[in-house]
Amino acid sequence: MTDTNQKQLGKTLWGIADQLRGAMDADDFRDYMLSFLFLRYLSDNYETAAKKELGKDYPKLAADDRSVPLATWYKNNRKDIPTFEKQMRRKTHYVIQPPHL
């Protein structure tokens, strides 16, 4: 990416952030966004750990399928959910239900 493209991308992202922020104070918006980024980090970390834990049983979805693979696994393996969540609590120390990923 060229320096010019990088600067243009930065301006565009800042413009979008300003529109999202609206009348909210920049410091409040930062705290709000930091919370979302942290939740995104936890979600990504959990999905990675679940994929590792389930191995070959982790569902592979079509490229155009926007659903959460873990939701598919939950739907197809209801009896195994308590054991899976117990193992995930041991490994990641938390569980995130698929609808919240």
Image (cartoon, grey):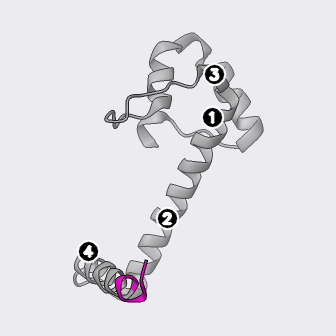
Q: Position of residue 12 (x, y in %)?
A: 28, 81
The residues colored magenta run: 1-6
Question: Which image quadrant is residue 13 in?
Answer: bottom left
- Along the horizontal axis of the image, is 81 left or right of 40? right
Q: Amino acid at mark 4?
A: Leu
Report the residue marked by disc 3.
56
Label 4 with label 2: CB-CB less than 8 Å: no
Q: CA distance from mark 3 to mark 1?
A: 11 Å
- Along the horizontal axis of the image, is 97 left or right of 65? right
Dot 4 falls on a residue whose secondary structure is: helix
Label 1 with label 4: CB-CB less than 8 Å: no
Disc sitting over residue 50 in the figure: 1
Q: Is residue 41 magenta?
A: no
Q: Nearer the viewer, mark 2 or mark 3?
A: 3
Q: CA distance from mark 3 to mark 4?
A: 40 Å
> Dot 1, how many residues are within 10 Å of its Cα: few (below 14), some (14-19), or many (20+)?
many
Report the residue marked by disc 4.
20
Q: Is residue 68 above or below residue 23?
A: above
Q: Position of residue 35 (x, y in %)?
A: 49, 66
